[in-house]
Amino acid sequence: MNLTLKVWRQKSAQDAGKFETYQVSDISPDMSFLEMMDVLNEQLISKGTESVVFDHDCREGICGMCSMFINGEAHGPDRGVTTCQLHMRKFKDGDTITVEPWRAKAFPVVRDLMVDRSAFDRVIQAGGYISVNTMGNLPDANATPIEKHDADAAFDAATCIGCGACVATCKNASAMLFVSAKVSQFALLPQGQVEATDRVRNMVQQMDLEGFGNCTNTGACEVECPKGISIENIARMNREYLKASITA
Amino acid sequence: MASQRGLFGTSLARKYWMALTGLFLITFLVIHLLGNLSIIFGTGEDFNAYAAFMTSFPPIKIVSYLLYASIVLHAVDGIVLARQNMAARPVNYGSYNGAANAGWASRNMALLGIFTLLFILVHMKSFWYEMHFGELGLDANGNKDLFTLTVTAFDQVWYTAFYVIAMIALGFHLWHGFQSAFQTMGWTHPTYTPIVQFVGRAFAVVVCGAFALIPLYVLISPNV
């Protein structure tokens, strides 16, 4: 395959940045999108120019690092995948592909396609944990019976990899899907319910402080989420926050 | 503002107020439509009696102030939310395929809302203001003759066209907004949420369609 790439180039957070156009040829349809980007970078390096900076790590769809906005969609046109799981066969020979970083005030661009997602870490630090010392003397996990439905829903919420596709794809750059998944994974389990009130209030407060937008319930986030996190989690967080605000 | 907690100021709290005021305004639409239908199914005197009742019956007057407050709160809160949302993405995408993952109405709620607000202002100036503070003649029963004013207004093509367009905009606003309010309040359920979604969309089409039909009926019908 021969492709034209319009790639966002930005030297630093302060730099304005602009699109650069590159040609790549002899791309195999079996390559992942990141492997295609590797080909581009090798080409750029052999010419003595700066390679395109992008985040990547596991390349098997579990780390959530590869944050590329491809042809107007988070992780490209395929569903339920990260960029490393997106194959070049999803494109046609001769296509022009636009590649951009996640765009949100809370995710400043570090360089080229790499953004700073530490806003998510600070939301977790605000309450995305249980205050239990896990050093020794733990009761048997199965000693606390948990309804199968709740256990499954908590597990589904916990599969969130914090990639930020929900923020990137949301027209408001809202982090509601991420935060609600992290609230839900605790709210559904007895261990998490002890601190549920403070958790949801603190995490929502931190989410707002980071400058994420508000939720319009468009549902775009759950469509683009590589882990299929449902907006039912957002409804659950809305319930949790309402309950916490009235009772606290 | 962003550092607040509780039922005011936070992103979630602002959405609760949007949802609650929105749902209250939706209930008002039903009452308003039932009265308006007297233009088609009743006489001019029936319509004037309805208008007189709505502006004089004390419990309705109390609810009307709640209604005005809800319109203002829904509009102001909506504008604040929309501004925050724009600020949350200071640099736009070069390529953004919003249609790939969300419906058109859900992506244009602020725009549809602003147009609806504009409509409400024109509508209230034309009829509400005239009914309360204008110089209207009296009908055979001694009620203010709002009917003649209404019919005269809707016999103008441009005015009726504006109403029909406004009702289409409101229909799209409710198409998304009705069920969105339930999601925002956390009132979701595997069985009932699909029903809420269906009812919301049917409501948007039927109610806004009926509202749009009335001026069209006045315009087209030779009898009114």
Image (cartoon, coloured by chain):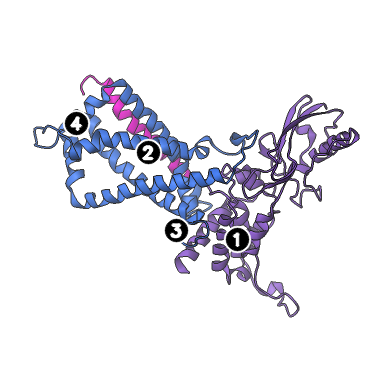
Whether residue A233 is in magenta: the answer is no
Placement of the C terminus of chain B among the 4 image quadrants: top left
Look at the image and give the residue range highlighted in magenta.
B195-224
Q: Which residue is tagged 4?
A: B147
Whether residue B214 is in magenta: the answer is yes
Q: Which residue is tagged 2?
A: B117
Q: What element carries label 2?
A: helix
- Identify the mark at residue B8; answer none if there is no mark: 3
Q: In which quarter of the image is residue A183?
A: bottom right
Pointer 3 and pointer 4 on the same chain: yes
Report how far apart the C-alphas of labels 1 and 3 lie in the structure: 20 Å
Q: Which of B165 and B183 is in front in this view?
A: B165
Of circles 2 and 4, the one toward us is 2
Q: Colour of chain A?
A: purple
Residue at mark 2: chain:
B
In the displayed structure, would residue B5 be above or below residue A17? below
Q: Which residue is drawn at 19% across and 37% down?
A: B131
